[in-house]
Image (spheres, rainbow, N blue to C red):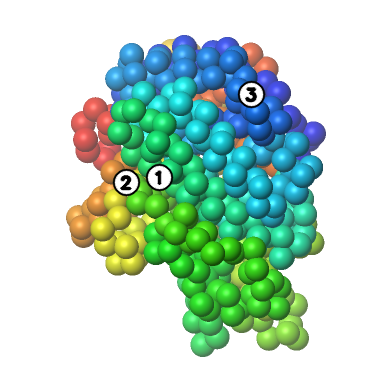
Amino acid sequence: MWNGDTGDVADDHYHRWESDLDLMAELGLQSYRFSIAWPRIQATGAGAVNPAGIAFYSRLVDGLLQRGIRPIATLYHWDLPQALEDAGGWPARDTAYRFAEYAARTAEALGDRVATWTTLNEPWCSAYLGYGSGAHAPGRTDGAAALAAVHHLNLAHGLAVQEVRRAATNDPDLSVTLNFHVIRGSDDTSPEAIRRVDGLANRAFTHPILLGEYPADLLDDTREVTDWGFVRDGDLAQINQPLEVLGVNYYSTVTVRMWDGVSPRTNNDGHKDMGGSPWPGSRNVEFLPQAGPFTDMGWNIVPDGLEELLLSLKAQFPEQPLMITENGAAFPDRVTQTEAGPRVHDVERVDYLRRHFGAAHRAMAQGVDLRGYQVWSLLDNFEWGYGYSKRFGIVRVDYDTQERILKDSALWLRELIATRRIP
């Protein structure tokens, strides 16, 4: 973690949730996507439910509803209980069943009020960055383990959808959130590179979840890494559950070609290089440097990539409604003291949001069924391995005083919501 930062206090939202909900109401938010921490509900990943954990989320959901804000709850945002990692983590099949149990217990407690349930957030990151590249916890670098994690995350999703449908009493929408890779080429080897990366990054999740199958070319590409023997009879039927909405996370694009095996290999895939690879079976794919401008994460800013992605998903899955569950940008914000008080003039973030909302609007005009747009993020927060060094929020948080400051981007979003026009 950058600077040895921890999430122990972060935004102190656990204690400041009421004032944070008032801030959401002030901005006119119609929905709020939040994540439930599995260890807060079941510290060891199994067994009895922690009443204090359930009570916090119950208060949060009630507070949202009292303010007319639709609760969108994500069940898993990478915080696996340590006891389950010690027992094998996501490469172990049992983790999927433990997740289904956790989903059931949570839905039994909150399933009369939560409007939308999202099972997993970005399982690509959990599987490939956690077990393949070593860039995220638990930091393993085993391609076969990463692919086993892919399948068990998919299985966990399908089992959890069934448990939430059983337990919920308010007929909620069910969803999963995927971080889609928008992949572009540079030369005549690029089509093969694009196919390989698309298989690992996108189709490894969309095809079992939405079509009930793993792509044959993905299995072929990875046959030297694993025989996929962890896929058992009946698994794909469990995974392939109807979804009311598919969550779409989009930040940037990648440019690829096949590596010639001679020149130095470039690996600009947008993630920290920790020695492993998030591309099992395709280390011969090269990720090229991208043209700017860039966010503070080093990710290129390409709004038309969002339009391209939404139209591609419409073409592949024409009956599937979509929701943008994350889109936003980190920039090195500065606080300016004015007569009216402290301000953050985040001009770059306002421009980023304007252009991406415009791209989404163009996609809707071309027939994309887009049900919502969640900006990442409401508050500056603990950004995983980057700690507090990256600020994504439209609301600035002073981590020493916990003061919240509405950035210009928050005021911009408030105007968009109020007027239904892109400012």
Compute the Cα span from label 3 to label 1.
Answer: 26 Å
Q: Nearer the viewer, residue 187 or 345?
A: 187
**Labelled pair 1, 2 in contact (Cβ < 8 Å):** yes
Residue at image mark 3: 48
Q: Earlier in the sequence, mark 1 or mark 2?
A: 1
Q: What x and y, as percent, mark residue 89? A: 71, 47
For badge 2, the amino acid type reads: Glu
Q: Earlier in the sequence, mark 3 or mark 1?
A: 3
SS at badge 3 = loop
For badge 1, the amino acid type reads: Ser
Q: What x and y, as percent, mark residue 55? A: 53, 15
Mark in the foreground, 3 or 1: 3
**Residue at position x 66%, y 32% in the image:** 46
For badge 3, the amino acid type reads: Ala
Q: What x and y, as percent, mark residue 209? A: 44, 57
Disc number at residue 175?
A: 1
**Residue at position x 38%, y 38% in the image:** 165
Compute the Cα span from label 3 to label 2.
Answer: 30 Å
Mark in the foreground, 3 or 2: 3
Q: What x and y, as percent, mark residue 36? A: 54, 30
Q: Earlier in the sequence, mark 3 or mark 2?
A: 3
Quadrant showing the N terminus: top right
**Residue at position x 49%, y 42% in the image:** 160
SS at badge 1 = strand
